[in-house]
Amino acid sequence: MAFEKPNTEINAISSELVRRLNENSRRLRIMEQKIDKLESSMDLLEDNTLNQMNDMKIGLERIATKITALGDKLTSIETDMARINKELGRTATKAEVKQLETFIDLVNPITAKFVTKGELERAFEDKLGRKA
């Protein structure tokens, strides 16, 4: 029995050591799994960030292209406006049109009271006849 008691203590100590070793191994596996999950999450975040940055870069390039096109259109519109203003400078003003309208009304045979040659001669003869 003397040998059994130390054997029992050795067995108890060994089983406690094995239990602790198993517990530490379990904890280590859990930590490794958590680290693997974190690494996967980090990789996924990096991929998503890179994809979003690429999408934003493409979007910004499109916006820059549209802005350039709008600038070109604006330049074209400004050129057209300058040409139109120049042409408007050569057109008649409202006062000039009114003056032309008055002149046309004066010489318009439909509305003006012109005398024919025969009417003038008769009026002349009538005047001469009255004086005589």
Image: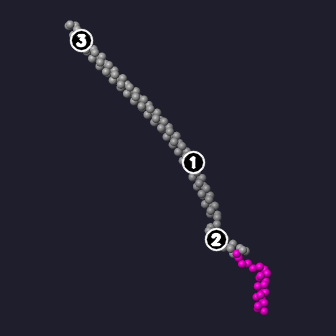
Q: Which of the 4 quarters of the picture holds residue 121?
A: bottom right
Residues in magenta, as a range: 111-132
**Image mark for residue 8:** 3
Residue at image position (67%, 71%) is 100
Q: Label 3 neighbourhood size at 10 Å, few (<14), some (14-19), many (20+)?
A: few
SS class, disc 2: helix
**Residue 88 position (above or below residue 29):** below
Q: Earlier in the sequence, mark 2 or mark 1?
A: 1
Marks 1 and 3 sit apart, C-alpha to C-alpha, by 90 Å
Closer to us: mark 2 or mark 1? 2
**Image mark for residue 98:** 2
Q: Residue furthest bottom?
A: 132
Q: Tag count in the figure?
A: 3
Residue at image position (51%, 43%) is 60
- Give the residue pinned by disc 1: 69
As for residue 131 lying within the magenta part, the answer is yes
Q: Left or right of 114: which side holds 49?
A: left
Q: Left or right of 98: which side holds 38?
A: left
